Amino acid sequence: MTETQTTVELTRDEIVARLNAGARRRLDMTAEEMVARYTTGDLPDPGRVADLLALASLLRRDDPLFVST
């Protein structure tokens, strides 16, 4: 992670690690499952992980995290 006064830059691996940690802690599922369930409308209370979903949106749409969606 690189941080300046106004910008934080995360690598893809750092983003995925944060997504996995948050999804496991809050939902007891992987980041891939969280994103897939959100995409299909099958994620109960997505507001509970809105910050994680916003973080996932920083990844490219062809990222392997979205393969199952």
Image (spheres, grey):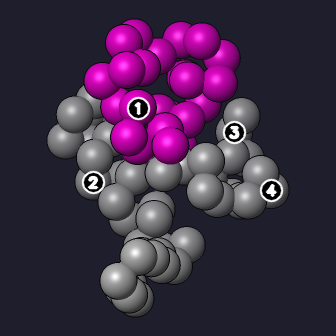
Residue behind mark 2: 21
Residue type, label 2: Ala
The residue depicted at 80 percent of the width and 56 percent of the height is 62
Residue behind mark 4: 62
Residue behind mark 3: 68
Q: Earlier in the sequence, mark 3 or mark 2?
A: 2
Quick one: label 3, few (<14), some, or many (20+) residues within 10 Å? few
The residue depicted at 37 percent of the width and 20 percent of the height is 47
Q: Residue 48: percent from the left, percent from the top? A: 30, 24
Q: CA distance from mark 3 to mark 2?
A: 19 Å
When asked about the image quadrant of residue 5, the answer is bottom left
Quick one: label 1, few (<14), some, or many (20+) residues within 10 Å? few
Q: Earlier in the sequence, mark 2 or mark 4?
A: 2
Q: Which residues are magenta?
A: 32-54
Whether residue 46 is in magenta: the answer is yes
Q: CA distance from mark 1 to mark 4?
A: 21 Å
Task: Tell me the SS state at disc 4.
Answer: loop
> As drawn, is 66 to the left or to the right of 16?
right
